[in-house]
Image (cartoon, rainbow, N blue to C red):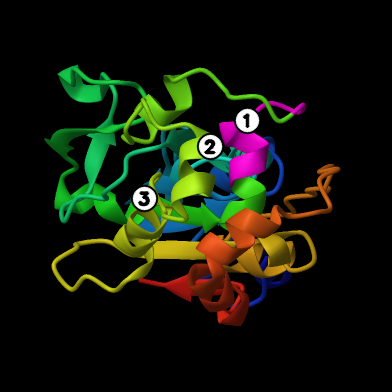
């Protein structure tokens, strides 16, 4: 019996890892230590295992699996949708285009009776006792590539006004306006700073991810989030930046290039 207990508990009787659904029924029949409450992890989810000890045996209901919640934020054209797809097997994923993250983390769209666009924070604060299960990720990319990827179509023509509205920018601005003025009219620097700069008033962390390193270093992100492989492949065919945009965003591009793959704000 001692040997089997060690096997079930990973050797020390403390850290149990459930890997197969039918292991539950085996555990219920074993004589185990007196445990009132434990928290386990499985495939990126938290598993809350409530048990009662009675006459040396555990009698329990089926464990309650609490999925992780991932917020993936970006100004567009940064691989955020790809990252969302990769994260879906490990929890609930929400794509966010809000320009400014709130000080106290909020739900999104119509969740909890919210009434706003489904990619925006909705003003309804998430209770403090739920925050540990939320992971806010901000992914950014060289603006010269991002603008060409998301702000225009594959032929270089203007997109509809929808995307500018979604990232809470002036919908009347055209790419030609940016180039001719030589200014960041889309306010991408502002968007970036809102997420990347440390704000001690926030009650949550933001994991800031550099797109350019994401594919080669994606295992680092998996380890940070406590999940399995993401298996992301870079399918972007855009190899050349726009020289005019490179000049406009030169300072921001240099800052991004000097950043580590993951920074926390």
User: What range of the chain is rendered magenta?
Assistant: 147-155
| Location of mark 3 (residue) | 187
Q: Which residue does the image show at 38% across and 46% down from the upper left? A: 185
| Location of mark 2 (residue) | 175
Up-down relation of residue 249 to residue 164 (above or below): below
- Answer whether residue 220 is visible to the viewer in this image: yes
Label 3 element class:
loop
Q: Which residue does the image show at 83% across and 48% down from the upper left? A: 233
Q: Which of 10 and 260 is in front in this view?
A: 260
Marked residue nearer the N-terminal end (3 or 2): 2
Up-down relation of residue 246 to residue 167 (above or below): below
Up-down relation of residue 236 to residue 262 (above or below): above
Please provide percent x and percent y for residue 88.
60, 35
- Answer whether residue 55 is visible to the viewer in this image: no
Q: Which residue does the image show at 13% across and 67% down from the upper left? A: 201
Q: Which mark is residue 152?
A: 1
């Amino acid at each position: 019996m001692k040997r089997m207990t060690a096997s079930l508990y990973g050797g020390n009787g403390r850290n149990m890892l459930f890997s197969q659904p039918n292991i539950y029924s085996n555990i219920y029949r074993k004589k185990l230590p007196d445990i009132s409450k434990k928290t386990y992890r499985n495939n990126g989810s938290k598993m809350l295992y409530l048990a009662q000890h009675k006459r040396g045996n555990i009698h329990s209901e089926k464990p309650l699996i609490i999925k992780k919640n991932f917020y993936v934020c970006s100004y567009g054209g940064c691989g955020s949708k790809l990252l969302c797809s990769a994260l879906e097997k490990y929890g609930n994923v929400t794509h966010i285009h809000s320009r400014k993250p709130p000080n106290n983390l909020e739900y999104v769209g119509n969740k909890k009776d919210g009434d706003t666009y489904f990619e925006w924070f909705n003003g309804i604060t998430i209770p403090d006792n739920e925050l540990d299960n939320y992971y806010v990720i901000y992914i950014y990319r060289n603006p010269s590539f991002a603008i060409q990827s998301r702000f225009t179509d594959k032929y270089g023509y203007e997109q509809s006004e929808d995307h500018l509205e979604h990232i809470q920018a002036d919908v009347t601005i055209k790419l030609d306006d940016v180039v001719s003025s030589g200014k960041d009219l889309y306010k991408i620097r502002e968007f970036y700073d809102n997420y990347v700069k440390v704000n001690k008033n926030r009650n949550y962390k933001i994991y800031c991810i550099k797109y350019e390193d994401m594919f080669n270093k994606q295992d680092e992100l998996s380890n940070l989030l406590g999940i399995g492989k993401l298996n992301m492949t870079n399918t972007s065919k855009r190899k050349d930046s726009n020289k005019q945009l490179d000049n406009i965003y030169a300072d921001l591009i240099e800052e991004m290039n000097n950043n580590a793959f993951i920074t926390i704000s």
